[in-house]
Amino acid sequence: MLTHVVLHGAVDRGEVGRILSQIGAAIPRDTFPVFLHRSEPTRREAQARMPVPA
């Protein structure tokens, strides 16, 4: 039951995104990734400077 409660919102967001893309509307960015992007810019910048393994 707890798993269902935790994951249910993700399912709903996925369905809304699918419907919006089918009608040609702009799909909004998920709020959690946007929050992380805005709240930790130095961490994101440090990750961008790390070398990519070959």
Image (tube, rainbow, N blue to C red):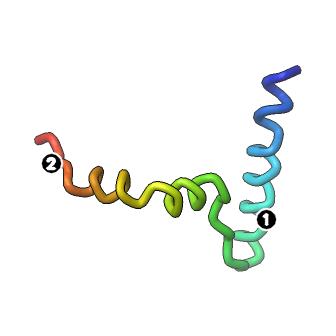
Mark closer to the chain start, 1 or 2? 1
Given this view, does label 1 or label 2 mark the residue nearer the observer?
2
The image quadrant where one finds the N terminus is: top right
- Is 45 placed left or right of 36 in the picture? left
Most foreground residue, 45 or 3: 45
Residues under numbered marks 1 and 2 in contact, where contact means CB atoms less than 8 Å apart = no
Question: Are there few (<14), some (14-19), or many (20+) residues within 10 Å of tag 2?
Answer: few
The percent coordinates of residue 24 (x first, y second) are 71, 79
The percent coordinates of residue 34 (x first, y second) are 58, 61
SS class, disc 1:
helix
- Residue underneath mark 1: 19
The percent coordinates of residue 8 (x first, y second) are 82, 38
The image quadrant where one finds the C terminus is: top left
Q: Residue at x 36, y 51 (%)?
A: 43
| Residue type (three-letter) at the residue carrying disc 1 | Ile
Most foreground residue, 51 or 14: 51
- Residue underneath mark 2: 51
